């Protein structure tokens, strides 16, 4: 008995699935984990999303997937902003406050305090401090914290100050 004669679509379905996956379109936007803030934090994050710039450090807006009021991006590869993230552990590490951590430094730019962390892959991540929501900005590979990072944080200072009040963020 010829097994394939009775199941003509038996091999066709997997072949079509593989072909469709191989031909799928690609999107130029990055994919990021969307934060899940509490209700109070969600409100200020939505306020921030409304006042974020269309250009950042000369890069056009390119929001990541899935689209969310808690994330934004600029450029390709994208500088990524996430609002409503959990407090980074280094935010409360005494070594950081004392200047004793080589991978994390606290500082401020235009009235907004940030924790600056070098990631294992050599990229930089900044998280707001002293605001009612934690806002995290990740630079793309090759961007220096001192040059491009300062420019990015300078451009984001006004929207952050406008939308995210000073205060203590939720301890999540």
Image (cartoon, rainbow, N blue to C red):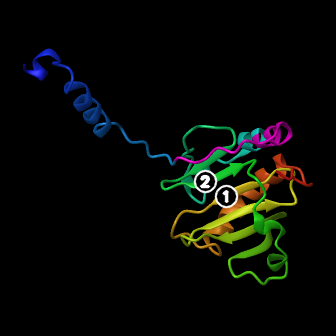
Callouts 2 and 1 close, C-beta under 8 Å: yes
Q: In which quarter of the image is the N terminus?
A: top left
In space, the residues marked 2 and 1 are separated at their CA atoms by 6 Å
Residue 20 visible in image: yes
The part of the image, by quadrant, that contains residue 116 is bottom right
Q: Is residue 19 above or below residue 143?
A: above
Residue 94 found in image quarter: bottom right
Is residue 142 found inside the magenta-colored segment of the image?
Answer: no
Q: As displayed, is residue 140 above or below residue 18?
A: below
State how many labels appear.
2
Label 1 neighbour load within 10 Å: few <14, some 14-19, many 20+:
many
Which quadrant of the structure image shows residue 119?
bottom right
Which of 109 and 77 lies nearest the eye of the viewer? 77
Does any portion of residue 54 appear in the rendered image?
Answer: no
Horizontal and vertical percent position of residue 159: 77, 50
Residue for point 81% across, 37% down: 43
Residue reaching furthest right?
167
Q: Mark 2 points at which residue?
A: 80
Magenta range: 31-45
Q: Residues within 10 Å of mark 2 (few under 14, many from 20)?
A: many
Residue 137 got which mark?
1
């Amino acid at each position: 008995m010829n097994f394939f004669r009775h199941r003509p679509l038996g091999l066709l379905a997997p072949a079509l699935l593989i072909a469709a996956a191989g031909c799928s379109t690609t999107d130029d936007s990055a994919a990021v984990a969307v934060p899940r803030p509490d209700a109070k934090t969600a409100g200020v994050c939505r306020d921030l999303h409304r006042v974020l710039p269309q250009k950042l450090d000369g890069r056009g807006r390119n929001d990541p997937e899935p689209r969310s009021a808690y994330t934004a991006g600029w450029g390709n590869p994208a500088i990524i902003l996430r609002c409503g993230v959990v407090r980074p552990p280094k935010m409360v590490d005494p070594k950081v406050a004392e200047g004793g951590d080589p991978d994390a430094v606290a500082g401020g730019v235009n009235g907004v305090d940030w924790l600056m962390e070098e990631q294992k892959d050599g990229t930089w991540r900044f998280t707001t401090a002293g605001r009612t929501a934690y806002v995290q900005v990740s630079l793309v590979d090759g961007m220096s914290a001192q040059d491009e990072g300062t420019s990015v944080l300078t451009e984001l200072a006004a929207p952050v100050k406008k939308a995210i009040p000073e205060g203590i963020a939720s301890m999540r």
